[in-house]
Amino acid sequence: MTMAPDLGSSGVDLTVRLLMAPTALARLTRSEASLIVGLMTPAHFKSGTCFIREGDATDNGFMALVVQGEVVVENIIVSRTTPITTAVLGPGCLVGEMGLIDEGPRSASCTAGTDAYCAVLTRDAFYSLIVKEPALAAKLLLGVSTLIAARNRESLQKLKLYASLCQTMQWEVDDMQRQVARQTAA
């Protein structure tokens, strides 16, 4: 992770506004968002830089708010060796949010699709927020949990669609085998 040049008060203000947005975490007030931004570290990722790697269990103690640029989220699926893109996220989106909650390996890779500026909140900074401002930490945690739940629901819908497609394909294969068997018997 490369530290970003100081974005100045306009960069801090933009980050605060992104945290306050209706689509953001927990509808934070300006003062709440400012407090959280004060715990965040700016980071710049050059286009093409993978800053979260799927399966990494060592560098997993942070989440990042995309302030500028795009981040490509990718996964390795089953026996594939080439990752597939599962999302392209822009300003106001969070990546790596499960890193605040558990110490498990990363579930996806995140690569800067363009030069990306992010505000990074480490697990340690989050723990300090729990001690200093428990109500705000609870609000932030609820927002992160809501985001994780929404992404889990989306993944479940995709899994259901995949299972349905597999079942339909199996029926087609079974039907073709029956047709071949009838033609062979005739």
Image: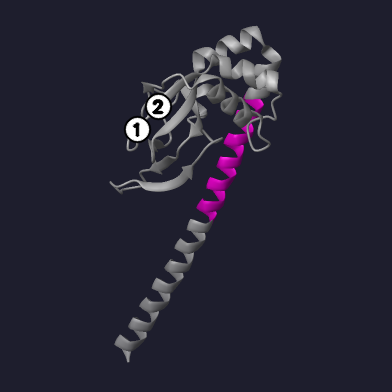
**Majority secondary structure of magenta residues:** helix
Residue 6, compared with residue 157, is above or below; it is above
Write down the quadrant of residue 107 in the picture.
Answer: top left
Task: Give the alpha-carbon distance from disc 1 to disc 2, as whole Å.
Answer: 7 Å
Residue 58 visible here: no
Residue 13, compared with residue 164, is above or below; it is above
- Tell which of 66 and 63 is nearer to you: 66
Task: Check residue 46 in the rendering and tell me which mark sits there, or answer none.
Answer: 1
- Tell which of 173 and 53 is nearer to you: 53
| Image quarter in which the C terminus is found | bottom left
- Tell which of 128 and 67 is nearer to you: 67
**Residue name at image x 63 percent, y 18 percent:** 34
Q: Residues within 10 Å of mark 2 (few under 14, many from 20)?
A: many
CB atoms at circles 1 and 2 under 8 Å apart? Answer: yes
Where is residue 79 shown, x and y percent of the image?
Answer: 31, 48
Badge 2 element: strand
Badge 1 element: loop
Q: In this view, does 16 lie to the left or right of 76?
A: right
Task: Check residue 79 in the rendering and tell me which mark sits there, or answer none.
Answer: none
Residue 155, compared with residue 164, is above or below; it is above
Instruction: Inspect the magenta stretch and tell me whether residue 20 lies in it.
Output: no
Residue 115, compared with residue 127, is above or below; it is below
- At label 1, the amino acid type is Lys
**Residue name at image x 70 percent, y 30 percent:** 27
Q: Give the range drawn in magenta.
A: 141-160
**Residue name at image x 46 percent, y 44 percent:** 88
Q: Mark 2 points at which residue?
A: 44
Q: Is residue 58 left or right of residue 119?
A: left
